């Protein structure tokens, strides 16, 4: 199970990673964690704008994001980009390739990023020894499906500012789980990416940001977004949430 190291891979260890509780199963002792290190044997550096994998490429590995942000997207029949989601540190990317043995979307780094490369053959082999790892992979897959489906169902019939509020709340919640502030966000994605993801036009997204800013709910300075009134933001999505 030893992997050959190249100039763009660095030896890493799950047992010493401060994100392991986010992307790896809990309940393993130190000896088990050392065995798990054999699954995550290398780290790959991906520069901003580079592809981690592309749609149609043969599926070989899952990737645990250590640092950085990614977006996943597909090409529409018209040749346009449709953003499917955004992924951050502590999340696993590439799960879409398990079923068809090829990646079904493009994964692009929105900033310089480090990912742990987990060859799926290694994951399967160790899963037979540690059923908890197999259950964890299934749990991660289910969580991602539920999260994305919930987002899509929620924004389906929403007004523009409601869609933006859902997006910002989802982002804040995920960042807060990683120890970041609940009141400040630095958007790694562009307004165009947000518009594509939310099924809106660029100018509609801009108007929604302006409306929430004018109402004192958020503060916007280029890619910086300050959450001035979290309860008000939640109330836009669910008017009864703050009653």
Image: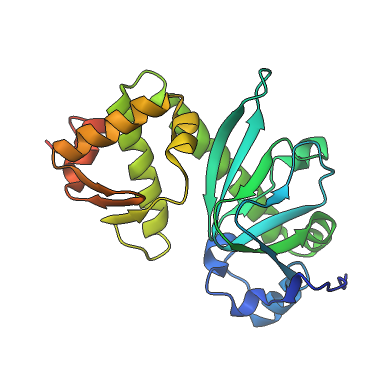
Residue at x-position 76% and y-position 40%: 103
- From the image, which quarter does the N terminus lie in? bottom right
| Percent x, y of residue 236 | 22, 32
* Count of number-bearing discs: 0
- In the foreground, 129 or 222: 222
Q: How is the image coloured?
A: rainbow
- From the image, which quarter does the C terminus lie in? top left
* Depicted 96 relative to depicted 63: above or below: above
| Percent x, y of residue 33 | 67, 75
Q: Quadrant of residue 120?
A: bottom right
Residue 24 appearing in the image: no
Residue 192 appearing in the image: yes
- In the foreground, 193 or 12: 193
Residue at x-position 75% and y-position 41%: 97
Q: Quadrant of residue 143?
A: top right
Q: Quadrant of residue 159?
A: top left
Residue 163 placement, left or right of 63: left
* Depicted 17 relative to depicted 55: above or below: below
* Depicted 201 relative to depicted 123: above or below: above
Residue at x-position 28% and y-position 31%: 208
| Percent x, y of residue 17 | 58, 75
Residue 64 placement, left or right of 179: right
């Amino acid at each position: 199970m030893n992997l050959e190291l190249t100039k763009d891979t660095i030896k890493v260890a799950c047992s010493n990673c401060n994100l392991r509780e986010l992307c790896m199963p809990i309940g393993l002792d130190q000896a088990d964690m050392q065995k798990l290190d054999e699954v995550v044997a290398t780290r790959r550096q991906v520069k901003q704008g580079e592809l981690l994998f592309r749609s149609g490429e043969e599926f070989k590995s899952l990737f645990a994001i250590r640092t950085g942000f990614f977006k996943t997207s597909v090409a529409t029949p018209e040749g346009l980009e449709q953003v499917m989601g955004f992924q951050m540190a502590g999340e696993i990317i590439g799960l879409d390739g398990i079923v068809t043995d090829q990646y079904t979307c493009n994964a692009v780094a929105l900033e310089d990023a480090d990912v742990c490369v987990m060859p799926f053959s290694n994951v399967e082999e160790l899963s037979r020894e540690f059923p908890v790892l197999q259950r964890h992979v299934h749990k991660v897959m289910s969580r991602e499906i539920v999260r994305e489906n919930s987002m899509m169902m929620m924004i389906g019939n929403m007004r523009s500012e409601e869609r933006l509020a859902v997006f910002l709340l989802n982002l804040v919640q995920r960042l807060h789980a990683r120890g970041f502030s609940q009141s400040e966000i630095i958007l790694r994605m562009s307004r165009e990416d947000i518009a594509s993801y939310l099924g809106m036009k660029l100018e509609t997204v801009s108007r929604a940001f302006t409306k929430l800013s004018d109402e004192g709910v958020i503060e916007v300075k280029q890619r910086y977004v300050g959450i001035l009134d979290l309860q008000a933001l939640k109330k836009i999505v669910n008017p009864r949430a703050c009653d």
